[in-house]
Amino acid sequence: MGRLFGTDGIRGVANRDPMTSQTALKIGQALAYILRKKNHRPRIILGKDTRLSGYMLETALATGICSMGADVVLVGPMPTPGIAFITNNMDADAGVVISASHNPYEDNGIKIFANSGYKLNNEQEAKIEELVFSGRLTELLPPSRDIGKAYREEDALGRYIVFLRHTFPKRVNLEGMKIAVDCANGATYKVAPTLFKEMRAEVIGLNMNPDGTNINRDSGSLHPELLAKTVLSRKADIGVAFDGDGDRLIAVDEKGGIVTGDRIIAICAGYLKEKSKLKNNLVVTTVMSNVGLIEALKKLDIDRVETTVGDRFVLEKMKEVDAYLGGEDSGHIIFRKHHTTGDGIITALQLMAVMQGTGKPLSELSEIMKTYPQILENIEVSERKDIEKLPKLRDAIKQAESALGSSGRVLVRYSGTQLLLRIMVEGPSEKEVKNHIRQIAKAARESLS
C-alpha cells in the first residue's frame, strides 16, 4: 500500500502526485466514507490558504466529499487553526485545510481535523490511505439521491475573530499599541489586521495582497527582515510575522530585535508562572530548542519535558503530561487552554497580553533568556538514507558532538515534509558552530550525492 500522510498531513508539489486533482478527489471520498453512519450525513469544513493551486484542490476535494454522500462547508482562505476552531464550533464531523504552511507556493498540502479540533490520529489516517489505494471507492459510492451538497459559510471569519478575542484578558484591549503585521501574503491577511484594529490597535500592514504565487515569498515568519526595518522606521511597539497558514509567529521588538519561538515561550512561561496560571508548572519543548531556553526555564524553576520535532509530537506530549504551554523555536506554539493546535494569532495576543500586564517593552521582556549561537543548514536529498549507514556523515556528526561536549548540541535529521536533510549545530561561539556545520554539510553532500 502507498503512503500519503507525513508528520504534518499530506504534502507535495502541486499538480504532481500526490497533490493532484485525482488524488484529492479520492481523499475527499475516503474521508467522507469513514465518517458516514446510518441515518447521518457527514458535514465537512473545507478551507485553504492563498496558493494558486488551492482552487484546483478545493474543487476536487469538494467533489469527492459530495460524491460520497457528505456535505461540504466552504470557508475560503482561513488560517489552519481557524479551520480547527470552525470544525468544532459548527459541530462538523471533520475539517480539511488545503495548505503547505511555510513552503513556497509551488507546494501544497492537505491537513485534516477531527470534530474535536485535533488532527486525525494515525489509525484514521491509515484508513484513508487504505481506501485511496484500494481501488474500491467507486463501488462504495452511494445512490444518486444521497449525493451531498456544497455551500459557503460567510460568517466563518467572524466566528473565528470572536474566538480569538476571547483568548485575550477581559476588559483589556490594544488601544495605544502600534503593531506592524506581516501576513506573508497568506491565510491571515484578512483576519489578523481586522482583529487588531477591532481591539483598537494602530495597524501597519505588510504583505497583505496575495496573488496566488507570492505566499511566503521573502516575507512572514521565515523572513522577518522587512518587518524589523518597518518596526524601526514606523516606531511600532511590536512586529508580528505569520507564516502562510497562520500557525506560526515570529515577533520583532521595538528595537528591531527578532524574537523567535523559544524566547516567546520563555516570556509567556515566566509570566504565567508569576500569575500562578502555568498548569503543572510545566512546558513542553523539542530537541531543537535552544540551550538558552533550557537554562532560562531552570532559572525560573519551571519543569520541562522534551519531545521530537513537530507540532503533532509537541501536542501529544502536552496532552500526555497535561501541560498548558509547549512549542518550537520556529514559532509554532500551542496554548492548550485556548486551542487544540498552534495558532500564530493567539501566540501574538498572549505575547501582547504579557506586555500589557507588565507594562514592559518587548525588548526588556526578551532579556529573560540568552540565545546560544545556532546555525541551521538544509541539504537537498533525493532519498532519506539511514544516517547510521553513512560512515562519513556519521563520523562528522560524532566529531562535532565530541568537540562541543556539554557546551553545545548537534542535531541532524530529515524533514518530515520535504526531501531535505536538516543540520543544526549549537555552541558557545558562532565561529566554532560555523566550522562544525561546514564539516557536517560537506560530509552530507558527499554521502548523499
Image: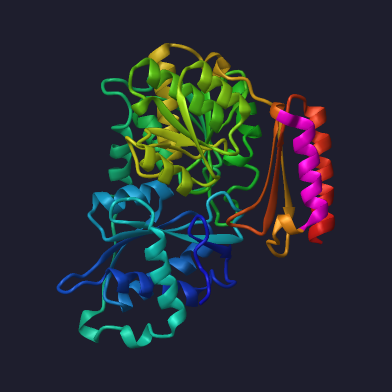
On screen, 439 above or below 388?
above
| Residue found 65% across the figure and 27% down from its top | 229
Q: Main secondary structure of the magenta part?
A: helix
On screen, 387 above or below 1?
above
On screen, 295 above or below 5?
above
> How many numbered marks are there?
0
The answer to which image quadrant residue 286 occupies is: top right
Q: Is residue 433 visible?
A: no
| Residue found 48% across the figure and 17% down from its top | 300
- 27 relative to 370 in the view: left or right: left
**Colour scheme in the image?**
rainbow
Q: Is residue 33 visible?
A: yes
Measured from the top left, where is residue 310 in percent x and y? 52, 47
- Name the image quarter holding the C terminus: bottom right
Q: Nearer the viewer, residue 160 or 354?
A: 354
Measured from the top left, where is residue 342 in percent x and y? 43, 42
The answer to which image quadrant residue 34 occupies is: bottom left
Measured from the top left, where is residue 319 in percent x and y? 36, 42
Q: Nearer the viewer, residue 46 or 410?
A: 410
| Residue found 74% across the figure and 59% down from its top | 389
Q: Is residue 396 on the magenta stretch?
A: yes
Q: Nearer the viewer, residue 345 or 295?
A: 295
Q: Is residue 236 on the magenta stretch?
A: no
- 430 relative to 255 in the view: left or right: right
Magenta segment boundaries in residue numbering: 390-405
Residue at the limit of the structure toward the left, as seen here: 39
The answer to which image quadrant residue 193 occupies is: top left
Q: Nearer the viewer, residue 246 or 232?
A: 246
Measured from the top left, where is residue 378 in percent x and y? 72, 49
| Residue found 62% across the figure and 22% down from its top | 256
Residue at the limit of the structure toward the top, as seen here: 359
